[in-house]
């Protein structure tokens, strides 16, 4: 469903964040991207949905080269790609229901959203997404009264409002404590397996990678240095990806 061809990203300061990255993603995969901070993981996800403009290369999504799309056609392609960020990006004083509803903004329009003019169908759809991430009963709770893990699950529900075929998750557990990380990852796994949504997720911890990923790609200094199954990442590969002095940290 997704094909990355010779993708390069050079920032205005001359830093080359991606260097000829190329891989395919099959429908229904749970692909995890690993690598040190600064290896290009976040840049790659932001290029896939064109938050960042690639310098060169092609991104083929659903048979269309989205690197060439503009305006309405780009918005249509983006509507099929949900995004979950490390820092949740919720409106703290708004309720869970309102925050999740914001995922439907492209279809709803800004003015109707600001005025809270939601149809009953839109409210029902929102409640359904809230239930999927295990937060039913918290629709009227303000976002800033939730735990970090609950806030990230609200962010996942918001992304689901787009009815995406592809979900990008950029370090979704990096801001959470270890005990909460599995909770969030299990909901991403549920969305992948039960709803058939393809997931591409950036992660640091190999213990999470081994439990949830169907396939792994590793980046180092913007280059792809590994592609394979989680079980193939032995100590030798770990040192090659993260450096000789790196030590693996496990999340139980």
Image (cartoon, rainbow, N blue to C red):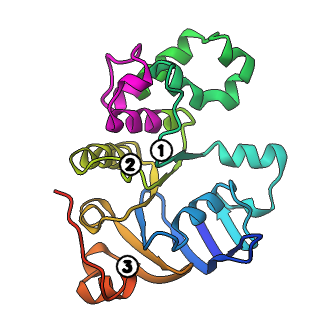
Cβ–Cβ under 8 Å for marks 1 and 2: yes
Q: Of the two numbered discs 1 and 2 on the same chain, state the one appearing first in sequence.
A: 1
| Residue 156 x/y as whole percent | 44, 39
Spatial separation of the CA atoms under disc 1 and disc 3 = 29 Å
Which quarter of the image is occupied by the N terminus?
A: bottom right
Residue at which label 1 appears: 87
| Residue 34 shown left or right of residue 231 in the figure | right
Residue at the spot x=58%, y=66% of the render? 44
Residue at which label 2 appears: 175
Question: Does residue 140 sit above or below 231 in this rendering?
Answer: above
Q: Is disc 2 placed on a helix, strand or loop? A: loop
Over which residues does the magenta segment extend? 130-157
Q: Please tell me how crowded label 1 is: few (under 14), some (14-19), or many (20+) other residues with Cα within 10 Å.
A: some
| Residue 131 x/y as whole percent | 35, 26
Depth check: give the residue in front, 36 or 66. Answer: 36
Q: Of the two numbered discs 1 and 3 on the same chain, state the one appearing first in sequence.
A: 1
């Amino acid at each position: 469903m997704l094909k990355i061809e010779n993708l390069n990203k050079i920032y205005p300061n001359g830093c080359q964040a991606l260097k000829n990255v190329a891989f395919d993603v099959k429908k229904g995969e749970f692909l995890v991207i690993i690598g040190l901070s600064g290896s290009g993981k976040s840049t790659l996800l932001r290029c896939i949905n064109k938050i960042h403009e690639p310098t060169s290369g092609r991104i083929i999504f659903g048979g269309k080269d989205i690197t060439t799309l503009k305006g309405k056609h780009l918005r249509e392609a983006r509507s099929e790609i949900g995004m979950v960020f490390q820092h949740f990006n919720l409106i703290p004083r708004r309720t869970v229901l309102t925050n999740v509803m914001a995922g439907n903004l492209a279809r709803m329009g800004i003015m109707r959203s600001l005025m809270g003019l939601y149809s009953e169908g839109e409210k029902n759809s929102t409640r359904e997404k809230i239930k999927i991430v295990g937060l039913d009963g918290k629709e009227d709770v303000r976002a800033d009264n939730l735990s970090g893990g609950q806030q990230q699950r609200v962010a996942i529900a918001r992304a689901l409002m787009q009815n995406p075929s592809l979900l990008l998750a950029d370090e979704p557990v990096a801001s959470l404590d270890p005990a909460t990380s599995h909770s969030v990852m299990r909901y991403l796994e549920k969305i992948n397996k039960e709803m058939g949504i393809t997931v591409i997720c950036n992660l640091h911890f190999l213990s999470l990678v081994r439990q949830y990923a169907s396939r792994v790609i590793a980046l180092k200094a913007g280059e792809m240095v590994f592609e394979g199954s989680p079980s193939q990442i032995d100590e030798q590969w770990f040192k090659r990806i993260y450096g000789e002095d790196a030590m693996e940290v496990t999340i139980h």
